Amino acid sequence: MASTLTVDVLIAGGGPCGLMLAIELGRRNIRCLLVDAKLGTAFNPQANATQARTMEHFRRLGFAHEIRSMGLPPDHATDIAYLTRFAGTELARLRLPTAAAAPQAIKAMSGSWSAAELPHRVSQKYVEVCLHQHAQQQASVDMRYGWQLTSFQDTGDGIDAWVQSVNGEEQLNVQAAYLVGADGARSFVRHELGIAWGGATGFKRKFMGGKMLAVYLKAPDFYARNPNDRSWMYVVVNPELRAFIMSVDGVSEFAFHIQMADDAATEALTEADARRLFAQAYGQDIDIEILSMATWMAGHALVAESFQQGRVFLGGDAAHLFTPTGGLGYNTAVEDAVNLSWKLASVLKGQAPPALLDSYPLERHPLAVRNTGYARQFADSIGLFEAAPELEDDSPQGEQARALASEYLNGHVRREFNIPGVTFGGRYDGSPTIVGDGTSAPPDAANTYMPCATPGGRPPHAWLADGRSLYDSFNFEWTLLALGPDAPDTQAFEHIAQSMGLDLKVVRHADPALLALYEAPLALIRPDQILAWRGHHANQAQAILAQVLGYGDTVHGSTTDTAPTA
């Protein structure tokens, strides 16, 4: 007879979303079981860009420096270059700091790029190893790779599920309070719930729309035989083919992707075909070792119609599918986990009502629609660009075509890769757990970001006089910033938080510049580093804390749940 395991949260899927969820819940002593049919973390490179906001979350958890040490060597270029062939004529380039230079470079930046971290170019296969190590360190987390979810039922009081080893030799009954489906694009959880995709798919473009061949390969001579400056990512634009390649280890391993014709018989592609296509993209014959190859479809901008059904939640690729332009899929998945984890923990610990969990789909669904929309814009920008037939000709017409392509592509690379607005500008305006103050944030724009203390978004960032990031002073759970030399009394917040069992830390900064940045002396920061409320005094502390925990709109007098009293 199969044994039974009782946990608080069952997580289906061990990719970035599931692993991040396990770390966040484990840090809060929530009992979790994570299952994934794979025998270990990812072998193939998959996503290759960790955005700055994701790095800020890794910094919050204490391992951003570990992530930044992974992937490319510290002094390897992180540029993005557009060329006629990988070893052909360069058309455009965006130069970016190396991993070694990033920690100091970010301290010199301001405005749109006022942040605790810069992006990092690292393959998901390395990120997953780091996340797995940190999830394993959590005493309350049980991770079982080579296991899969085979059935589940939401009984109303909990989840009754069965998991089984992929070899079929073992099975386990799991009793959980909640289930999170972070089990990828072909999510078993989403399928069983009958949740359909919304959005759009099937976009056809010259590039990033239709059939793509992905090859994970070794090319030891790639750099030595390439006359162009070293880059992290090379994009081929010419009338014959469209392709891109990213360095995985900065030495010899690469992730190569090439657009295939719609009528191409991709199922019959051989390694010889892959070698031929790579040589065409490189511009000359070059020896490669193929580690793996597969086909995939570009042109998705899909978001699940619902992220929650009863006690079951969706996150990551189970909830949204991106065309990878802009590198937004994996980063959106990480933020799903960051948003959901503290809410699950608050409900499970009795600090908040189950209604708090309703804010997860209300907050994350619009963000997924926003982010898939941005990825679609970037894909249109590069995929609909027509490469002139004479682009590679050694002629005045070829020279003119390259000049026109260079002008366009230098604009495009900044539109797709200099995106502080996408990275930092996601907001939860309208969420019932955000206490609005009547102000509005600046318009959402991909390439510009104006730090803003309007509740519902990322707290404005600053570097402190001692060299720390302002974020480094935040509590892991709740933070109440008391700003300026004459900050108001905060005892009401402290007293109410203690009575509610909340871990609230008052952080005082007397610097007038921070008071000016936040435009109020008090600012309440959620565990996911979202600004939930700001104000000038603490006389509504009880109502404010009740609303941000899901007890209803108690600040303005209409409550839907019974708010706690001190």
Image (cartoon, rainbow, N blue to C red):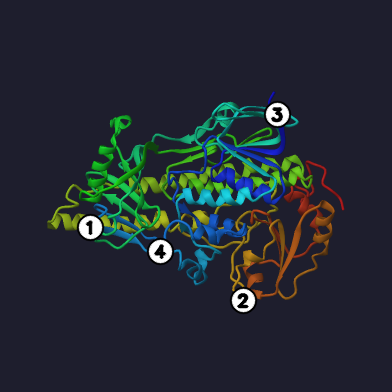
Query: Badge 4 local density, few (<14 within 10 Å), some, or many (20+)?
Result: some
Secondary structure under tag 1 reads: loop
Q: Earlier in the sequence, mark 4 or mark 3?
A: 3
Task: Kindly report the distance in space between the C-alpha atoms of the residues bearing marks 2 and 3.
Answer: 56 Å
Whole-percent x, y for residue 366 in the image: 56, 43
For marks 1 and 2 on the same chain, the one whose residue lies earlier in the sequence: 1
Q: CA distance from mark 1 to mark 2?
A: 46 Å
Residue matched to label 2: 465
Expressed as whole percent of the image width and height from the top left, the position of residue 269 reads 29, 33
Residue depicted at x 74% and y 40%: 354
Give the residue at x 72% y 43%. Answer: 356
Closer to the chain start, of discs 1 and 4, is 1
- Tell me what residue is drawn at x 75 percent, y 71 percent: 487
* Residue type beneath disc 4: Leu
User: What numbered label is drawn on residue 96?
Assistant: 4
Q: Secondary structure at mark 2?
A: loop
Give the labeled residue for mark 1: 89
Asked whether the beta carbons under mark 1 and mark 4 sit within 8 Å of each other, the answer is no
